[in-house]
Amino acid sequence: MNLYVKPLQRLLCLVLLAVLCTGCSKVAFEGTDITGANFGGDFTLVDHHGKARRLADFQGKVVALFFGYTHCPDVCPLTMAEYAAVMKNLGNKAADVQVLFVSLDPERDTPTLLAQYVPAFNPTFVGLTGTPQQVAAVAGQYKVIYQKQGAGANYTLDHSAGSFLLDKKGRLRVLENYGASPAVLTKDITTLIEE
């Protein structure tokens, strides 16, 4: 029995070391790490200048992707203000980040309206829209749920409130919960910038 103790101990030590090293190499995000998720992907919508833009156009930058609408009373302006604060926190590193606001309300959110709303938070932010079918397809790709509430011109939309971070290669990496502080968002974005 003594003959097997040392080899068995060595094997257990090697397994433990491998497990510990694997844990050390994983990037730690404040938000939910969704690296390798089987949803998301490229899409094409129209920006707030009326130009067709693909998500792939922004590769080389960390992308913060948020789905909302301009008439939103709370979630959307708060999230956009948080990303505006993040850009200030990042200083020179902000040049490596692109915030994209995808409108879930193409009936009201024309490129003209998006051009007034989105850059008001930060002039580098880009608003995106399309036909109702195009928007629904992109929302479906990212598992974003939204539903119109009420009738007439003053309807609201219930919608998923989180935002996504994509790395410089365009890969989906982090889901940030609604209300994540600018400090949390800045940390996760900085981690992706420095990868």
Image: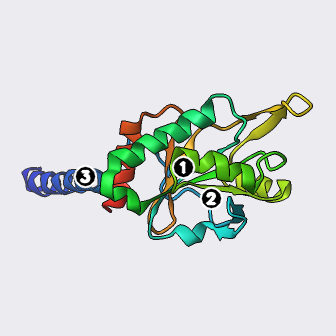
Asked whether the beta carbons under mark 1 and mark 2 sit within 8 Å of each other, the answer is yes
- Secondary structure beneath label 1: strand
- Secondary structure beneath label 2: loop
Q: Nearer the viewer, residue 6 or 139?
A: 139
Reading the image, the residue beneath label 1 is 164
What residue is rendered at 41% in x and 48% in y? 87
What residue is rendered at 50% in x and 31% in y? 179
Q: Nearer the viewer, residue 7 or 20?
A: 20
Left or right, 49 with respect to 175, comes to right
Q: Mark number for residue 24?
A: 3
Quadrant for the C terminus in the image: bottom left
Distance from Cα at disc 1 to Cα at disc 2: 10 Å
> Where is residue 140 shown, x and y percent of the image?
73, 52
* Badge 1 amino acid: Phe
Reading the image, the residue beneath label 2 is 40
> Where is residue 8 shown, x and y percent of the image?
17, 54
Left or right, 30 with respect to 54, comes to left
Q: In this figure, what is the number of numbered marks?
A: 3
* Badge 2 amino acid: Gly
What residue is rendered at 76% in x and 48% in y? 109
